[in-house]
Image (cartoon, helix red, strand yellow):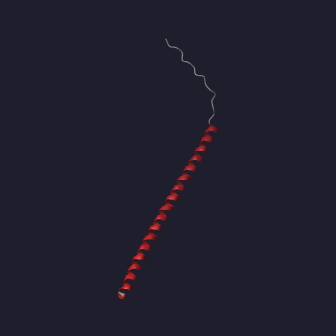
Amino acid sequence: MARNIGRFTRHQGFLTLWALFFLASVSLLLSVVSVGLTARRETTNQLTRDYAQTTRVIERQTKRHVKKRPAQRQEKPAKQD
C-alpha cells in the first residue's frame, strides 16, 4: 500500500489543478459577462438621457420660434342653392 501513496497523491493533485483551472476560467468568464452587461446598461441609460435632453431642447426651440397666431374665426360657407 505504501508504494501507491505517491501515485494517488500526484493524480489527486492533477485533478485538483484542473478543477482549479476550470473554476478560475468560469469565474473569469462570469466576470467578463457581468462587466459587459453593466457597460451595456450604462450605455443604454446614457443614450436615454441624451435623447430626453435633446428632445427638451428641440421642444423649447420650437416653442420659441413658432409664432402663435390669434384664434381665427371659423366662417360658415355661404349656402348654395
Number of marks present in the image shown: 0
Quadrant in the rendering for residue 11: bottom left
Query: Looking at this view, is 8 or 48 the one in front?
Result: 8
Q: Position of residue 49 (x, y in %)?
A: 57, 50
Q: Residue furthest top?
A: 81
Residue 8 screen position, x and y as percent: 37, 82
Choose between 27 and 1: the one closer to the eye. 1
Residue 68 at x, y percent in the picture? 63, 32
Residue 73 vs 35, above or below: the answer is above
Query: Is 71 placed above or below 33 here?
Result: above
- Out of 50 and 34, give the one closest to the viewer: 34
In the orientation shown, which residue stands out farthest toward the front?
1
* Residue located at (52% from left, 14% from top): 79
Q: Residue at x 40, y 82 (%)?
A: 9
Residue at figure coordinates x 57%, y 46% from the top left: 52
Q: Position of residue 20 (x, y in %)?
A: 44, 73
- Indicate whether 34 appears above or below 61: below
Query: Which quadrant, please, contains the N terminus?
Result: bottom left
Reply above or below: 60 against 47. above
